[in-house]
Image (tube, coloured by chain):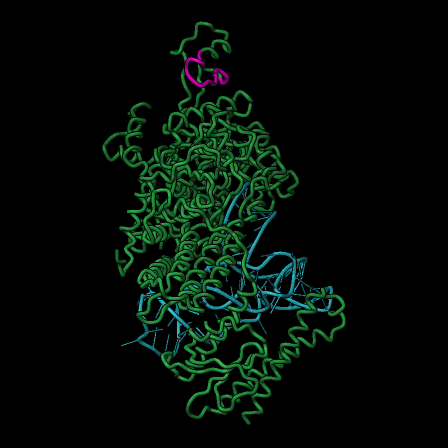
Amino acid sequence: MALEAKYNAKSIEDKWYKYWMDNNYFHSEVDERTPYTIVIPPPNVTGVLHMGHMLNNTLQDVLIRRARLKGFNACWVPGTDHASIATEAKVVAKLKADGIDKANLSREEFLEHAWEWTHKHGGIILEQLKKLGASCDWERTKFTMDDNMSASVIKVFVDLYEKGNIYRGYRMVNWDPQAKTTLSDEEVIHEEKQGNLYYLNYKIEGSDETLTIATTRPETILGDTAICINPNDERFTHLKGKKAIVPVCNRVIPIIEDEYVDVEFGTGCLKVTPAHDENDKMLGDKHGLEVIDILNDDGTLNSFGMHYEGKDRFVVRKEIVKELEGMGVVLKIETHMHKVGTSERTGAVIEPKLSDQWFLKMKELAQPALDAVLEKDVKLVPEKFINTYRHWMENVRDWNISRQLLWGQQIPAYFYGDGKEDFVVAENLEAAVEKARTKSGNANLTTSDLTQDPDALDTWFSSWLWPISVFNGILEPDNKEINYYYPTNDLVTAPEILFFWVARMIIAGYEYRGEKPFTNVYLTGIVRDKQRRKMSKSLGNSPDPIKLMDKYGADGVRVGMLLSSPAGNDLMFDEDLCKQGSGFVNKIWNAYRLIDGWEVSETKEETETAGIAVKWYRSKFQKTLAELEDQYSKYRISDALMSTYKLIWDDFCSWFLEMVKPGYQEPISAKTYKEIISILEDNLKVLHPFVPFISEEIWQHISERSANEALIVSKWPASEGFDEQLNAEFDFAAEVVAGIRTIRKEKNISFKDAISMSVINNEKASEGFDVVISKLGNISQLDYISEAIDGALTFRVKSNEYFIPVAGAIDVEEEIAKLSEELKYTEGFLKSVQGKLKNERFVNNAPDQVVAIERKKEADAIAKIEMIKTSLASLK
RNA sequence: GGGCGAUUAGCUCAGCUGGUUCAGAGCACUUGGUUUACACCCAAGGGGUCGGGGGUUCGAACCCCUCAUCGCCCA
């Protein structure tokens, strides 16, 4: 079967992915081997693949494929989460387009639509991951709303409630008026925005005097219930005990005193609106103020908004300023930069709102999870995130886990009366009735007397159990899968969700398994465009990953993603990186085409050059293999890729293949060929995690392989150590070859013309690589001499001098200039080294080894200077 | 406002315990090349006061102080 001249990524990638699937290589079952487990960070079920997923999942696939090659029982569990806010918003929008209003649907009807939507759009992203080559165990695919997964969530909720960790509280929460739900603190993004600071005059009751307050939100004056001054602020002592009148609504409110007020900010008079600001709420509680909520759930004003009722808060802001200006109470308006909380999901400006919500107490639960990271039982990569993690965990706040949504697990709290405490928490209605009877003392309660809390749980309250629940470890804590696969090995995710998800998984791990959920957390960077903007749908600056893979092949894109993404640093994505990736794939392909095209001769002897080439490459390979082990162990995946890239491109293609390449139309010896194939196979193994498709294609083309001989399930090359001396000899020889090439270039000597060369071997360099030098330099004859040759071109490697006699006169002036330049440099170098050695404090204080190195440098430099001077003398 | 981190070649970044991995890599750039796998190629080459200033040390990209700029997290 002849090889196609052009590598056809698309058909080859489809072919091998299907082959891998057909042979079930991705599937893992509990067995006697050591497991190596990764759980995927579940993407949104209705989402589509973006560049962040590409990076993230390429990394996971590299890790899992290498683990598989290393003989671990590799298990990568895929799945999706239900993303309640985002999905519900999409379903609501779809219903609206169909002329259906969510408000007119029952919970059951709405959920039916939501499931329909999920089945229709869900899982697209998982199909897309297959294109990338993701070797997930698809039989284990999970969804956070699967029956078992939901049952796990409910069980955990009940358990935590019974332990006293979950409570219901009337608190100031983050309200998203667009999604009409609360958000946890972590879901609020604080953005610096340009706003205004409005200075408003309030009349003081029973006087003509006014006081001035400064506010960024003039529309909230309708909810004001006090003015607060600092008791130490002498400017306002005369206001103590008086009352102020709120403009527009003419409400009379007390002037209270509290040291909380910052005398520096604004005017030193603070308007207090307990319903709409967390700090004001605190003041309100302390001073027993009235709470007036002026907003509806959708961010419009309610009846307290008077003539603004029904209008949006931002519209009212503009209109009320006009009204206030008309009344002459606006003193001035300053522009003002301030942080505004916005919804992570909808982008809407968050409204602080008082309401009844469910909270999880975090302080105690967080302690083991904090210790685990500080003691490096759970390792964060890179370590710089440990500080961030610690800071968050030490100041952790209670987690608001309820959401005013339908799509998600409904909170298992059942109300049987009107009192605030008239509820029970139970796994199902039947159990709830039992508990309600006991708690209320009313034995006649029936299921119809109970009403379940309409709210759903935060999606993260599902995903924090993910590493446990995917193995059913909540419902059956002692099943063989959870005991085998848990704790998992690596988690690969974005730093953005360190708190949302990673920290909470660690918390859940210790609470429900008494053990960490994973050993290593590899935090990737954020994929940005060349202008450092985060890639996003709204900016339209993100390439379509599927199109990228069509254009450059999945292997090419994988390499492109990894080329420049050190852990924790953002990746400035550039399509050129994928081009470079596909260039690499092309290089691998053509190297194989070369080898595959050789005619093999059983009778031909192995050449001396090929013999040394094989010996050297094996040693070089081992050296790189050791580097790879080190890089993988530190999760320096892009370094590992670069080491592999250079091994293949430079060492294998540019040096090794050129060394073993037979002459034109000559066959290659069977012995050499066998060695080359064996070397190639080792190359393919270290390439496989990065470029799984082309490596499998070549592997399978080399010879017929049975199903259990596929590359994906082969064995990672064994570490056998390497010959440092041999590698150094090669490096020296390579410098000589480079010297010859430079001379050829400078003197326009075609590579086709063989030349002879002589050497004064001051370095006593090994002659082992002479055949290599001769072949790669096209040297017809290589002589060892002791006296310089007049009228020859020269170059030097260390203190060795090489002479290439050429027909015709050489440019003596040019040679002298070149030598003088080298002399000057070397003398300067010698001077600096001797300066060091003359310094007694250096000689006395520096380690012996360092001093010895400097003495060696000195000796080498002196030898080289001698040689150059001799050459110069002979030229003059 | 509090905390964390960064600043090294045109770009993206390595540089571990202060000294041979010490000023590096890849890309880009320049020059030359139709050598029997590859122009998605081959070969050679240029390019950096390691953000500024000060200090410690025999010795600093690396440690300390300070200033500047940028980024992230949390209020």
Residue A411, position in %: x, y?
A: 43, 24
The reply to whether residue A84 is in sight is: no
Q: Position of residue A796 (x, y in %)?
A: 53, 80
Residue drawn 31% across the image and 63% down it: A599
Q: Is residue A389 above or below residue A251?
A: below
- Chain in green on the image: A
Farthest residue, direction left: A98
Examine the rendered structure and indicate whether residue A384 appears above or below residue A427: below
Taking the view exactly as shown, the residue that stands out farthest to the bottom is: A876
Eyeballing the image, is A510 above or below A800?
above
Q: Nearer the viewer, residue A471 or A34?
A: A34
Question: In the image shown, does A33 or B71 lie closer to the viewer?
Answer: A33
Query: Viewer-proximal residue, A13 or A654?
Result: A654
Residue A123's x, y, as percent?
Answer: 32, 37
User: Which quadrant does the N terminus of chain A fall into?
Assistant: bottom left
Q: Is residue A97 left or right of residue A610?
A: left
Q: Residue furthest front?
A: A603
In this picture, is A619 found above or below A352? Answer: below
- Please check the rendered image and state whether residue A66 is part of the magenta-colored stretch, yes or no: no
Q: Is residue A842 visible?
A: yes
Image quadrant in which the C terminus of chain A is located: bottom right
Could you say which quadrant of the image residue A366 lies in? Answer: top right
Q: How many marks?
A: 0
User: Residue A396 placed where, x, y %?
Assistant: 56, 36
Q: Residue at x 44, y 5 (%)?
A: A444
Residues in magenta, as a range: A420-433
Q: Which chain is cyan?
A: B
